[in-house]
Image (spheres, rainbow, N blue to C red):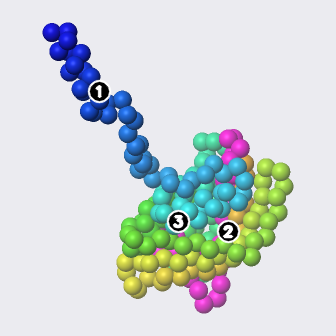
Amino acid sequence: MKKFLVIFLLILVTTCDVFETREPENPNTGRTEFVTPTTPEILFNNLKSSLREKIVENYMQCLIDPTLTESEFIFIPNASSLQNYPALSNWERSSEQQYFNNLKTSVNDESAVILELFNEFQNIQGSSATFQYDYRIIISPVDNSIPSEYRGTAIFTIILDSRNYWVILNWEDIGIEGFSSWSDLKGRFY
């Protein structure tokens, strides 16, 4: 009986790769390109990638979390957008999440939301900084009556939170004549 058991185990071990490790599966975490924002550059790359990949959690991590600091997120919309979208007057962090979720479901699944930031101006002062960018956002909406391009200037005040991560504290949007602005995009999808 012992001989039979030994032979059986030898056959089992040599024919089956019982002890061979398998190739690990890629986790589907929804956080594919979020990098710990230890520099302002990483923060703005995270903002762009969260839009491109349409990952709400990554987008929200770019904004200040009031549980990690005593400050609240502030968004100052473009003045003309405020007239068209009154909800922008009381905009807060949770409004960003609702807008992003609605945007995500209103654009084609296979297309990215493209954010281009250029003409950077920056003023870094220790644990806070101001960054100003001209921006261009391209979306591919399901509803063809919705504009696909948004342009303007965004002024971001960013700070280091209690984890020493750069996050957006204040965000001001300035529109460009003849183009829909980021404020319009937020107001439309709120």
Under tag 3, what secondary structure? helix
Quadrant assignment for the N terminus: top left
**Is 12 left or right of 141, judged from the image as shown?**
left
The numbered mark, 3 or 1, whose residue comes first in the sequence reads 1
Number of marks in picture: 3
Q: Where is residue 29? Give x, y as percent.
A: 44, 49
Q: Give the spatial CA distance, label 3 vs label 2.
A: 18 Å
Visible in this render: residue 120? Answer: yes
**Is 144 left or right of 49, judged from the image as shown?**
left
Quarter of the view holding residue 172: bottom right
149, above or below 10, in the image: below
Which residue is rendered at x = 26% and y = 33% of the image? 15
Q: Where is residue 147? Give x, y as percent.
A: 48, 83
Q: Where is residue 60? Give x, y as percent.
A: 54, 55
111, above or below 67, in the image: below
Which amino acid lies under the numbered mark 3 shown in the image of this protein?
Answer: Leu
Which residue is rendered at x = 53% and y = 82% of the image? 149
In the rendered image, which residue does mark 2 sit on? 172
119, 72: nearer the viewer: 119
